[in-house]
Image: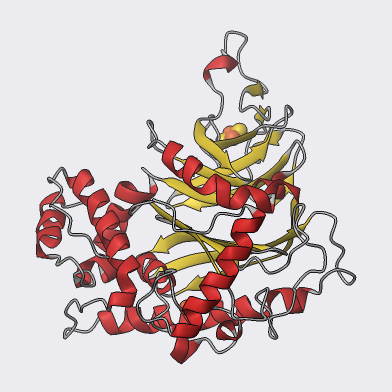
Amino acid sequence: MIDRDRISRLLAERREGFSLPQAFYVDPALHEADLKAVFETEWLFACNSCEIKRPGDYLTLAVGDNPIVVLRDRDGGVRAFHNSCRHRGSRICGKEKGRATRLVCPYHQWVYELDGSLLNARQMPDDFDRGEYGLHPVHVEVICGMVYICLAQSPPDLARFRAGVTPYIAPHMPDRTKVAFEMTIIEEANWKLVIENNRECYHCAGNHPELLVTLVEFALPDDPRGPAQFKQLMDAKTAKWDALGLPHKPADGGEEFRCIRLPFHEGAVSFTGDGGPACRKLLGDFTEPDLGSVRMFRAPNNWNHFLSDHILHFRVLPLGQDRTAVRTTWLVHEDAVEGVDYEIERLTEVWIATNAQDAELAEVNHRGIRSMAYRPGPYAPSEFMLTHFANWYAGKMEAFVGAPSPVRIAAE
Ligand code: FES
Ligand code: FE
């Protein structure tokens, strides 16, 4: 039972620029509210469309208690459905990924077409109207190969997001990629701590030796903390990207999304142990490997890196108040050959190490927040994206409980 008055009181307690009141992270009652207020209303990253390339390819995921199947239909379109049979509700597709000419419920074998329509319901009476019992659809949008789903009846408008990120991502041609490797880790931490951890690099210097071989820890082109060398690096790289027609300045995503191209350290072109390429075959039509990375985040569950030679998608789904699934996919050019153009270990080792370090940090963070001594603490200036995220989250919760939105103070 969700106590809306209590959530309103917790929101009123919240101080902008500070971490959230304890209950938002650790109270199981708030998990249910998060699912309703955030995960059942927002667009969620599901997968890349290259994961369901052929008709009948499908991928499943669970949004709270809602099993979902995303698939490629016979016309080449991407569709999503509630993965729950219209007979007596059984989950239909059980595998995480698969291929099917039709979806057959394992319980009594009702058969569904790839467009969700009920094709066959054996032993049902002659006057049974199959047209009434198609799978319930879920909204889908594909943006530069990224498949987003929304469980809401009336999804939020994605036009600004689509227009904002497409110029950055389209040149990397995600449609011409394939999954080289995927990995899901379960973190014993609230999903918001997983996101918060990703939204700042204040923790990088002390925790991510592999990542910092290549990643510059400053998040803005004019970061006041950046040393003179960073400014020189930015000027040199952005001049090169301008000449290639590749956008790099921060997109105007407000609290909804962030998109920016940032350089690696001088001499580094990819997330590898030595900064050299991870895949010899570059994405799309690129001939220049030194493109830094387009870093794109979309609240609530997705961050990404688009490099010259591979793409990384991260998908976050809450499993409980203190458990979160983080799925990482590494995409390379669809014609790249393992063992010739890339090695899995070289491609993945930096982010496998980084994910493990971040998981540990989020888990330790969660455990510490459970303390009776926890009080919300102040974000550092470099944690400005946490203020964005906390404001965004509070806005979703306010909308859910019907409270008016407070006046926002710009964090930057
Ligand atoms: Fe699916 Fe009976 S529940 S066929
Ligand atoms: Fe990290």
Q: Nearer the viewer, residue 338 or 387?
A: 387
- Tag count: 0
In this picture, residue 104 sits left or right of residue 101: left
Q: Residue farthest to the top?
A: 127
Residue 130 placement (x, y as % from top left): 59, 17
Residue 180 placement (x, y as % from top left): 75, 63
Q: Is residue 51 visible?
A: yes
Relative to 55, say whether 307 is above or below.
below
What's the image's color scheme? secondary structure
Relative to 127, say whether 188 is above or below.
below
Relative to 212, say whether 382 is above or below.
above
Question: Which quadrant of the figure shows ligand 1?
Answer: top right
Query: What residue is at 13 percent from the left and 46 percent from the top?
Result: 403
Residue 209 placement (x, y as % from top left): 55, 89
Q: Is residue 95 visible?
A: no
In this picture, residue 102 sits left or right of residue 161: right
Quarter occupied by residue 404: top left
Relative to 187, say whether 242 is above or below.
above
Q: Nearer the viewer, residue 230 or 98?
A: 230
Q: Which quarter of the image is occupied by the C terminus?
A: bottom left
Quarter occupied by residue 203: bottom left
Query: What residue is at 60 percent from the left and 51 percent from the top?
Result: 169
Residue 207 placement (x, y as % from top left): 48, 88
